[in-house]
Amino acid sequence: MQKVSYDAIGETLYTGTLSNGLTVYVIPKPGFCKKYAFFATNYGGADRRFLIDGQWRDTPAGIAHFLEHKLFDTETGNALADLAANGAQPNAFTSSELTAYYFECTEGFDENLKTLLSFVSVPYFTEESVQKEQGIIGQEIDMMEDTPDYAVYYNLLRGLYGAHPVRDMIGGTKESIAQITAQTLYDLHGAFYRPSNMVLCVAGDVNPERVLEIAGEILPDACDPVPEKDYGPVDQIPVVRAKTEVTMEVSKPLFLTGTRTPPGARGRACLHQELVGSLAVIYLVGESSPLYLELYNQGLITADFSTHYTCGRGHAFTAFGGESRNPDQVLEKLQAEIRATLMNGIDEDRFNRLKRGVYGTVIKGLDTMEGLCYDQTECHFFGTTALDRLSVLETVTSADMLAFIAENLQPEQFALSIVRPR
């Protein structure tokens, strides 16, 4: 395996690639009791249309999430139970970008890793179990549709995107998952759960060569090409729907506002774009900003107010929101702050303080195995490594941030999603 040392932060990254195309990362943590394994495929909720055997194929919303649920079924039982019986704490999730299966343990790591790689790579579905799961996930969908946080989030995305599937709930709808069959799951597993489309990331006091050896023993040898994906036509207008309001069982209005930005880049440019966007939204209305304090003191926002910048495949967006008695006024004040920033420029002292704060957050996250493995996996699929984040952060300038604000945070680019009390 290739070894790269990051002396400035005291971390080492081992990287190896098997003949089947699987990339394996190991981040040693000498002296740590916990060991963590994260096995993911570059296939998520937004990957719904792909090219296979020369034909474009459309699949139902929610199928990546459905497949995640069903992969724990094995011919002899359930992989969750097997891992738990061997002292591991397993779980899985599906995002718009990827699907991941993971566990943590203090003992029995090798056996648990073999179990993880085995059940993810060898599917077992029956029509009866698929029909049963449709009922279970249907109940999850009902709960999500009745959850204000989901409603305000997806209504914002539907305001920003007219075609990209990131606008649809990762779990799909009852109607969409009703189209799923055991054969559909087998087809998609065969298309996207290929080692060449996956990554294994391990953190802990482990032997890197042994991790690579186990992966080579368990996973298939074939290095198959990965189907091409399509996310639909690129939206040409700034927003699809400028304002969306619904009523639900909330005590006070809940809102999210944000803008669509150019899709995520590749390599170190991806990290640079993510850091610039994140710094920009924090600078404007993060917890230490003058605008945040003004809004909070006027009772226009509460302590749950947050900012976010997301980069994904074919999409990227800013988001600002939380509870507010007057969301429209918050948006007006945010846009006024943006105009003032563009007119007066960036406060260099405050910008440098924010950079140091982000630097500290990244350093702190290096001791969190879960976050580190997730971050490394996500970065891998964008052609970079998580441990490069700090060196990229050093290259970000206030001019980069000001340009981001000028290009991506104009008034006509904002969509607003509100959930008001019923």
Image (cartoon, helix red, strand yellow):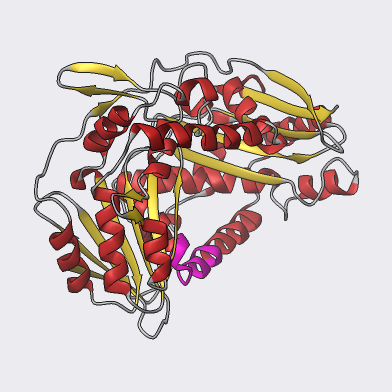
Magenta highlight on residue 366: yes
366 above or below 288?
Answer: below
For the residue pair 71 and 229, the one nearer the viewer reads as: 71
Residue 61 found in image quarter: top left
- Magenta region, main secondary structure: helix
Residue 207: where, in percent of width, then height? 23, 77
Q: Which residues make up the magenta segment? A: 360-371
Residue 261: where, in percent of width, then height? 50, 30
The residue that appears at 80% across and 27% down in the rendered structure is: 328
242 above or below 39?
Answer: above
6 above or below 125?
Answer: below
The residue that appears at 39% across and 86% down in the rendered structure is: 31
The residue that appears at 47% across and 72% down in the rendered structure is: 367
- Relative placement, left or right, of 315 versus 156 is left
Q: Would residue 410 be visible to someone looking at this image?
A: no
Residue 167: where, in percent of width, then height? 52, 26
For the residue pair 58 and 30, the one nearer the viewer reads as: 58
Image quadrant where one finds the C terminus: top right
Magenta highlight on residue 52: no
